[in-house]
Amino acid sequence: MARSWPAWAVETIDVSEPDPAWVPRATALIEDLNRRLDRWLTGPVEHVGSTAVPGLVAKPIVDLMAPVASLDDSAGADGTLVAGGWSLVPPDLDQRPWRRMFVLAQQDRRLAHLHLVESEHPRWRQALAFRDRLRDHPELAAEYAHLKRRAAQVHASDREAYTQAKSALVAAVVSDIG
């Protein structure tokens, strides 16, 4: 049976120059999510990914990460997020058992991603470390920007391949984080 995908699920990858609107957008979303998800959170929602690194090119999609004690125990957050306009990416499609992913879209374009991640999972620490290392090391951020631009050119219509093309650099940067 053929699946009917929302337009945002198949939009091409667009790596944009830094936009000063990304941080205020993330801040507003974080405030809403901290309230909306309060009973499941083990700490504050974090702005992660390239839009969280000043001056870095990025897909114009704010990436947020919310720490939870357990993905199973936070399953009740799904309805709360859907009521707030977020779309759950089914785990069997996401293929990343360490997170639960949601997309906030407007006019068929992704505005934000939200990743619920167990706060004790290595992916939580790695995402924060990667963001912070890019913030602290402009030469590393420049290398990553070059890689992102090249990956977007080669894999403009394949999000998984785009992500995979960046994975070796990401893994090297956080190799000391367990």
Image (cartoon, rainbow, N blue to C red):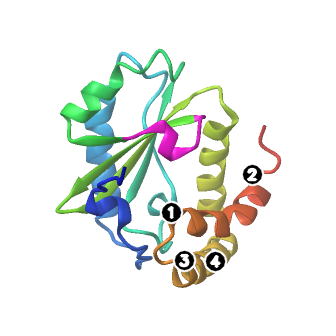
Q: Give the spatial CA distance, label 1 vs label 2.
A: 15 Å
Image coordinates for residue 153, horizontal then vertical, percent = 53, 84
Query: Label 3 belongs to which residue?
Result: 155
Q: Looking at the image, tell me whether mark 2 or mark 3 is earlier in sequence order.
A: 3
In this view, the residue in front, 66 or 167, is 167
Query: Label 1 belongs to which residue?
Result: 50
Image coordinates for residue 69, horizontal then vertical, percent = 54, 19
- Rate crowding at label 4 as few (under 14), some (14 to 19) or many (20 or more) other CA atoms within 10 Å: some
Q: Looking at the image, tell me whether mark 1 or mark 4 is earlier in sequence order.
A: 1
Q: Quadrant of residue 139?
A: bottom right
On residue 143, the disc is: none
Q: Dividing the image into 4 quarters, which one contains the C terminus?
A: top right
Query: Label 2 belongs to which residue?
Result: 174
Q: Are marks 1 and 4 in contact (CB under 8 Å)?
A: no
Residue placed at 69% from the left, 71% from the top?
Answer: 140
Residue placed at 31% from the left, 34% from the top?
Answer: 33
Image coordinates for residue 110, horizontal then vertical, percent = 31, 59
Query: Label 4 belongs to which residue?
Result: 147
- Rate crowding at label 1 as few (under 14), some (14 to 19) or many (20 or more) other CA atoms within 10 Å: many
Residue placed at 33% from the left, 28% from the top?
Answer: 78
